[in-house]
Amino acid sequence: MNSLVRYFFLLSLFFTWSVNAQMYQRKNMPLVDFNGSFKMKHFYFSPGLTYMLPNEITKLGGNNADNINANGRIGFMIEAGRYHIFEGGGNVFNYMDYGLSYKKLSGSEINRGNKSIFKQRYLSLNYNINNIKQLTSRRFIQSSIGANLDYKLFENNKDLITPENTERLLFSFHLKLGYGMKFQNRLFVIPTIETPIINIKEWEKGKSTYGIFNSRYRPILLKIRILWLKRSSGLDCLTPKLNPEDQNRYQNNYMQ
């Protein structure tokens, strides 16, 4: 009886080890095929929302005075542009993108009982380089670093008070984090969150928030990026585009 128990125990251990080994060795399917079926550049579209998060941390330049109460307001934005996947899926960064966007930034401040509201509209040029970390055959994490050049088109203020420290032309570097999903073979949907990490213009000693009225606000951009792969022409598909090094990357799930 004890021998039979030991036999089944050893058999179960072997079975468990075998299943775990198979699961460990199983690779995810690549997110993008680099066999010439698709072009490595195309368009993307990205609607979203904005929110001006008040900064009340004094060590980061915020204002937490009792007589001043800053609040963010929700705005909207829309962006469109092009992406370029790097040859072979890239290495540290897997693709870049650039686009044009329109966004509204809005917030309010109550100072000694008087409420002021700002609504700023910007036309922006955006550039990003993106890293993809593949989770499954259809899910991935995207981390990006980029720059944006914003031109203020116009501004509406409820009480006609002109906000302080707001320039017509702004330039910032930003970080962006997203969770991507692949649908079918060509469609990708990537919800992202983006915020500045340093403002170059207006330069304010390395701050990444915007000074408006007597308060500071952090722009938060919540976007849903929609991009799709464009099929190659028949002639493109006849010519393989993988050299041995790229083939090795492909087998190791780049883009990943």
Image (cartoon, grey):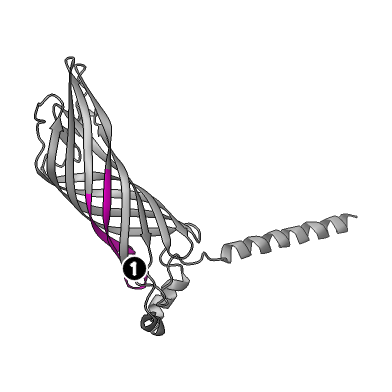
The quadrant in which the N terminus is found is bottom right
Residue 95 x, y percent position in the rendering: 31, 64
> Magenta segment, principal secondary structure?
strand
| Residue count near mark 1 (Cα–Cα under 10 Å), binned few <14, some 14–19, many ≥20 | some
Pick the quarter of the image with the C terminus. bottom left
- Residue at the location (38% across, 66% down)? 229
Residue 85 in sight in this render: no
Region in magenta: 77-101
Position of 19 relative to 153 (above/below): below
Q: Is residue 121 left or right of residue 38?
A: left
The residue identified by callout 1 is 90
Relative vertical location of residue 67 with respect to residue 225 in this rendering, above or below = above
Location of residue 46 with respect to 76 vertically, above or below: below
Query: Taking 220 as reference, is 184 left or right?
Result: right
What amino acid type should be assigned to the residue bearing mark 1?
A: Gly
Quadrant hosting residue 44: bottom left
- On the image, the x and y values in percent for residue 221 come to 29, 43
Q: Is residue 130 in view from this perspective?
A: yes
Residue situated in front as seen by the camera: 133 or 233: 233
Position of 200 compared to 189: left or right? left
Where residue 11 sits, quadrant-wise, is bottom right
Name which residue lies at 84% across and 55% down.
5
